[in-house]
């Protein structure tokens, strides 16, 4: 589990075995009980900025899982805990994602995860 500093600092770079990915793990400001563990990576082979979210693996993650009532969202309903986690991640990483989109014109943002 990585932690991102509150102040901007150079982030560690990681490479996948294929050599096509580079990224950084993150967990920072926002309601920590809802912020999932995640990884932001660039996949140059698909022109994608990938936000990869780890599923439930710790007691802390159960807080999100147990907040299972639904709430209205975009004309439908969403799992309240998952929506809260998604919002915490977006608030935490909006500047970084905006910067990556600016640095890599034509790249799309993809959200991936498991056990969600």
Image: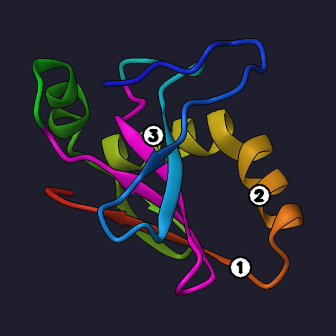
Q: Which residue is mark 3?
A: 84
Q: Please check the rendered image and state whether residue 46 is part of the magenta-colored stretch, yes or no.
A: yes
Q: Please check the rendered image and state whether residue 20 is part of the magenta-colored stretch, yes or no.
A: no
Residue 107 numbered mark, or none: 1
Q: Position of residue 115 (x, y in %)?
A: 14, 56
Does residue 95 appear to the left or right of 69 in the view shown?
Answer: right
Badge 2 crowding class, 10 Å Cα cut-off, few under 14, some 14 to 19, many 20 or more, is some
Of badges 3 and 2, the one in the foreground is 2
- Nearer-the-camera pick, 7 or 44: 44
Q: Position of residue 83 (x, y in %)?
A: 43, 49
In space, the residues marked 3 and 1 are separated at their CA atoms by 26 Å
Quadrant of the drawing holding the N terminus: top left
Does residue 109 appear to the left or right of 27 in the view shown?
Answer: right
In space, the residues marked 3 and 2 are separated at their CA atoms by 23 Å
In space, the residues marked 2 and 1 are separated at their CA atoms by 9 Å
Q: Magenta residues? A: 34-56
Q: Which residue is mark 2?
A: 100
Q: Secondary structure at mark 3?
A: helix
Q: Secondary structure at mark 1?
A: loop
Does residue 44 appear to the left or right of 36 in the view shown?
Answer: right
Quadrant of the drawing holding the C terminus: bottom left
Of badges 3 and 1, the one in the foreground is 1
As displayed, is residue 22 above or below residue 110? above
Q: Earlier in the sequence, mark 2 or mark 1?
A: 2
Q: Earlier in the sequence, mark 3 or mark 2?
A: 3
Q: Residue at x 63, y 13 (%)?
A: 5
């Amino acid at each position: 589990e990585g932690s991102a500093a509150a102040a901007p600092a150079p982030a560690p770079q990681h490479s996948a075995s294929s050599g096509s990915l580079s990224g950084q793990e993150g967990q920072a400001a926002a309601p920590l009980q809802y912020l999932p563990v995640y990884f932001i990576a660039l996949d140059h082979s698909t022109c994608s900025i990938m936000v990869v979210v780890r599923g439930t693996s710790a007691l802390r993650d159960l807080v999100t899982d147990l907040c299972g009532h639904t709430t209205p969202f975009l004309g439908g309903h969403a799992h309240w805990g998952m929506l809260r986690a998604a919002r915490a991640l977006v608030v935490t990483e909006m500047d970084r994602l905006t910067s990556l989109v600016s640095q890599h014109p034509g790249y799309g943002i993809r959200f991936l995860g498991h056990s969600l």
